[in-house]
Amino acid sequence: MPEITYRNTFLSDLRRCPRYAFHKYIDGIELKEISVPMTMGTAFHRGLEEYNLSPERRDKEFLEHCVMAGLKELKILGESEEIPTAFKLVSFHLEHYFDHWKDVNTFTDHHIELEGFAALPSGRQFYFRVDDCPLDNGDRTIVDHKLCSWQYASRLEKGIELASQLVGYAWGVQEVHGLKPIYGMYNLSVKVKDPKKICRRPIREIREEHINQWLDNTEKLLDMWERMCEDEAWPQNTDSCFIYG
């Protein structure tokens, strides 16, 4: 069984490098009560337009301000609402942007993630995490189109079955945020954006043996990545965000 110190360390990495979008359903309320048909890039550009902000700035506060302004402009946040502290940009990705961001037009070519709580019309809230390409088709509102792609399943996560991955990430969200995800959402291919091909798997129970299996397998995977980095054997076409942090 992994040491608790390892778990805590890994949870901090998990928070910065999520690969699954989990939705929080409270009291059985379906997600179809609210729609978020936008990308963070859209919110960013809306923020630029609405507040006439200079695109020359590159600091974290500027980016966060733009995204939040865009969320208000897109009516995701009410005009009179204060920007909730639960919304935040993932800083490790911001550092990644600064290395590659040539001008404002290339902003949406890079990942941007936001997490937080969104209010339902009933006043209840659900937890969400957005990564760059949300889809909107009724009750399946936000999902990353790259989740569980063939390259992750066949090359990066050998030995870690999808069911184990879902349980592991559900546990991570529960430990970090105190929320218990009910569904894990993913798709079958990195190229697929058809909402009909998005899968939603219920997470029935988070069992200790499944968590331990997932952590053990993931620890082996991280060891493999470290060796690959040391040997400079990391594939050029592999998503580099997995080795950040």
Image: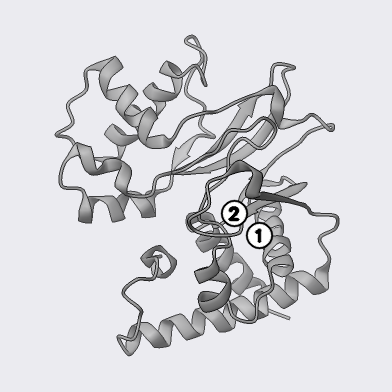
Please tell me which residue lies in front, 73 or 172. Answer: 73
Mark 1 touches mark 2? (CB < 8 Å): yes
Q: Nearer the viewer, mark 1 or mark 2?
A: 2
Residue 87 vs residue 179: left or right? left
Q: Amino acid at mark 2?
A: Tyr
Q: Is residue 130 above or below residue 153?
A: above
Residue 118's disc is none
Residue 221 coordinates in the image, percent (x, y): 54, 80
Q: Amino acid at mark 1?
A: Tyr
Residue 174 coordinates in the image, percent (x, y): 71, 52
| Residue pointed to by mark 2 | 20
Q: Is residue 227 above or below residue 140?
A: below
Secondary structure of the residue carrying tag 2 is: loop
Can you say which quadrant of the picture contains the N terminus?
bottom right
| Residue pointed to by mark 1 | 169
Please tell me which residue is depicted at 52% across the width and 27% down the height of the picture: 84
Secondary structure of the residue carrying tag 1 is: helix
